[in-house]
Amino acid sequence: MARLIYGKRGKNGPFTFDSLYDFYFFLGILTGQKHTKIAWEKNDEQGAWGSEGRVQIYSDLDFFPQGVIKRATAGVGNIKHRVNSNDFVIDLLENHSFCEIQSYGRSTSEIVPTSKLDVQYTVPEEYLEIFNEGLSQ
């Protein structure tokens, strides 16, 4: 089952969802990969305090859940917004059929769904419709 609260730190506090509907809608958006990418930046390899899990958003936030809008910060380059949350990205890897793709010679790896069907299997039946709405965005 999904969680509604991820992490403790951050200038805005933890990354939170208002409801499981919001979580599964966002999971659908992430699975569709049309507006987002997920990165694991190994900043500790470059002297920073540690690695960072980031959801990179390439579109406006008009249809994103409020928890995402509240937590989003400015992006860099063609990334319009980003949400930093190691705890959330780790949850995707451990509980929602996402996997890490390492790029040789790079300190950032991409986090992607193993398949849309695999992610869908992690969604309780009562949230499948909202997951599919997010997927169709």
Image: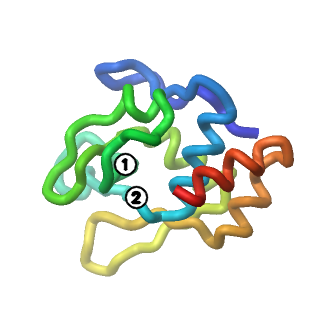
Q: On the image, numbered disc 2 is attached to which residue?
A: 35
What residue occupies the far right of the structure in this picture?
Answer: 125
Q: Residue shown at 61%/38% (left/top)?
A: 23
Kindly identify the amino acid type of the residue bearing the numbered disc 1: Arg
Q: On the image, numbered disc 1 is attached to which residue?
A: 54
Towards the viewer: 100 or 78: 78
Badge 1 element: strand
Residue 43 pos. (x, y %): 25, 52
Residue 30 pos. (x, y %): 52, 55
Question: Label 1, label 2: how many angstroms apart (C-alpha)?
Answer: 14 Å
Q: Residue 50 falls in which quadrant of the image?
A: top left
Towards the viewer: 123 or 84: 123
Earlier sequence position, callout 1 versus callout 2: 2
Towards the viewer: 76 or 66: 66
Lateral position of residue 51 relative to residue 124, left or right: left
The scheme the figure's colours follow is: rainbow
Residue 58 pos. (x, y %): 30, 56
Mark 2 packing: few (<14 Cα in 10 Å), some, or many (20+)?
A: some
Lateral position of residue 34 relative to residue 5, left or right: left
Kindly identify the amino acid type of the residue bearing the numbered disc 2: His
Badge 2 element: loop
Q: Residue shown at 69%/38% (left/top)?
A: 2
Lateral position of residue 129 relative to residue 86, left or right: right
